[in-house]
Each structure stands twice: as C-alpha cells, then as structure tokens.
Image: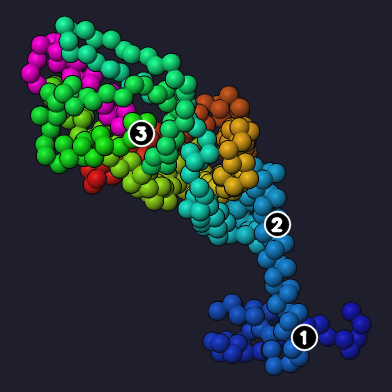
Amino acid sequence: MVEGMQTDWESLEKRTCDNCNVEVVGRFCPLCGQNNKNYEGSLWRVVGDIFREQFDFHSRATRTIRALVLHPGLLAVEFRSNRRASYVAPIRMYLFSSLLFFFLIALAPNRAEDRVFSFSIETHSYSLEAGNNETEESDSPSVVSEEESGFQFQETQHESKDFSEDIEPVRQHLDENINQMVSEILIRPDDSPSKNLLIGHLLRISDNLKKNDEEKPSDLELWITPLVVKVLHDISRLLEDVKNNLPLIMVILLPWMVLTSALLNCRKHVRMVHQLVFWMHVFTFAFLVLSLELFLVRFVLRGIEAAGFVTLAAYLVLLVHTYWAYHKFHGGGHFTGILTFLLLVLFYFVVLAVALLAVVALSIYNL
C-alpha cells in the first residue's frame, strides 16, 4: 500500500458505534451489527452503498439458485460445513418460494376450465314394470357438459326421465336437510354431472333394495349417502377448503420429513438442524418447480394437450433432483440410498393422503 494512503476500512477504525456506544474495530459493530460508516458525506456515497448492497444480495441470490438447481444437495453440505455467507439464508428462500407457489395457486384459473376430464358418467334408466331392469343407451353424440364447481365432465346424453318414484324408497330414510339438498340437486339441468352422479347412486341403492327384498338400506349406505349428497351439493366449497389448507399441510410435512429422514439415517449422526436445512432446500426447489409448472399449465398452455407433458416432466425432475440431493447430503451407496429414499417418498405420500383426507372430512362435516 502506498504510504500516506488510507483505505476506507482503516478510516473506520477506532470509532464508537452510534447505535449502542460500543467501540468498533472493523466495518461492523460486534454487538448490534451496524455498519460503521458515516453517511454525513456526499449523496453519491450513499447511493453507491445502496447499489453495492443490492448487487451483493442479487449475486448471492443468483449463486444460491444456481447451486440449488444445478448442484442438488450442495447448499445443505455447505451449511453443514459452516460456509453460509455466500448464500441466501435457507429460511428466506423457503418462505419466498412457498409464498410464490401459494400466490400462483390463488391466482390461477382452475385447470378444469380448459381441460375436460374424460369421466364417462352413464345415467341408467330403471324400469319398475314386471321387474324389468336394463340400461338404455342413447345414439346421441358425446357432448361436454356444463362446468360445475370447477370440473367439467365428458358425458353421454341420455333420454330424460323422471326418477322420483325410483329413488323414493331411499329418500324416505334420509333426514329433512339431506332431502332438501337432494331436491336442489335434482332440479339442475339433465346434463349436470352432480345430478347424474346422485341419481346413479340412489338408483343403485334402490335396485339393491328390490333385489334383496329389503325395506331399508344398510347402515353403511345410510352413512355414505348423506356424505355423497353434501359433496355433490357444494363441491366447490370442498375444493376451496382443500386449497386453503395446503399451506398448513406443507407446514406439517416439513417437520415430518425432517424427523423421518433423521430416523432412517440415525447411524450417520446428522444433526437435526442440518436435516431441517436440507429439507428446506428440497421444499424450496419443489416450490420453484411447481410454480413454474403452474404458470406454464394454467397461464401459458391453457387448454393445450402438451400441458400434461409439462406436468409429468416437472414431477420427474422433482423426483430425480431430490434423490441426487439426498444422496449427496447423506452419502452412502446408491442401493441403500434408493431404498431409504423410496421409504421417505412412501411416508411422505401417506402423511399427505392422511392430511388431505382429514381436510376433506372436516370440510364435509362443516358443509
């Protein structure tokens, strides 16, 4: 260094922090962390510092995303090795990616508005005369029914018929509220999926009564039928409840994966905090990939058949990327790693299914 010249760092020595009155040696206060710079000088210095801080954050964010995408498991290994300053904090990335994903879910139009699910709903006509029971097929072409509660069904039109007498033996065993919902569903158009599904369900029960010469449906049928009626009466509310509870479900899944992974790899003595950081990075990548898939399928490729391939590719990328991250972080051979990874995936979907069923059950109960 040239004699007489003084660096900014040296000029900041032997100062007292204005925030907490502690003597500062270096650029930052050792107690409160405040930058040991005096902004009473030029405006350009203030502007320059702002730009430097922003570009420093963006460079760390770019470095973090590059490592997250191209080097599975590297961020967790770096954190375990106590090399953290070069990357964005795991919790910040996790919160940002999860908020982005749930924000897109809230904005995205329902996929069923553009994609027709080929659920073929056959409406059966039952004749009560002379014990004759047969299915009547129509020669009319398949048409796309009305959109109902976020779903569209591909349905075959059938000759309209009044099924009131056919389903009356079942309705007389339902309570008043459920019968009111049944009446509201039955006044819907003939091509309404919920109406056709409900009629088919009630007719099957009625047909079983006649075949078995019984006067009352079974206890199981009496328990299931009100649930079916409630769901078909207002399925949009059920779907909305599931969507609204997705963040809570993901909050439950994160510690579950941390605990399960720690138990399956207990011999490797990986600290719980490092397991948490690893799965936060896994979930972060998953949220980013699913956000991209959601954006492409719901906004860019709406109604295009290629959207299905995008979804398939997204889930394949998630599966392969997560395994390589898991293998890099936990080490060991591929055979053992694949077995434990498949167990983790199985446990993940079991808990996910249980959580979704719990949400659906609570939603149906509150309908």
Dot 2 surroundings within 10 Å: few (below 14), some, or many (20 or more)? Answer: some
Residue under pointer 2: 62
Q: CA distance from mark 2 to mark 3?
A: 50 Å
Callout 2 amino acid: Thr
- Label 1's element? helix
Q: Count every numbered label the image shows and give the total.
A: 3
Where, quadrant-wise, is the C terminus in this rendering?
A: top left
Dot 1 surroundings within 10 Å: few (below 14), some, or many (20 or more)? Answer: few
Q: Is 4 drawn above or below residue 247 in the view shown?
A: below
Callout 1 amino acid: Trp
Taking the magenta stretch, the answer to whether it contains residue 210 is yes
Q: Earlier in the sequence, mark 3 or mark 1?
A: 1
Q: Earlier in the sequence, mark 1 or mark 2?
A: 1
Q: Give me the residue at 10% from left, 29% from top.
A: 172
Callout 3 amino acid: Ser
- Label 3's element? loop
Residue 192 tag number? 3
Q: Which region shows up in magenta?
A: 192-216
**Where is residue 118 shown, x and y percent of the image?**
47, 26
Q: CA distance from mark 3 to mark 1?
A: 68 Å
Q: Is 297 drawn above or below residue 27 in the view shown?
A: above
Residue 123 as seen in the image, left or right of residue 97: left
Q: Give me the residue at 36% from left, 39% from top.
A: 356
Residue under pointer 1: 44
Q: Nearer the viewer, mark 3 or mark 1?
A: 3
- Label 2's element? helix
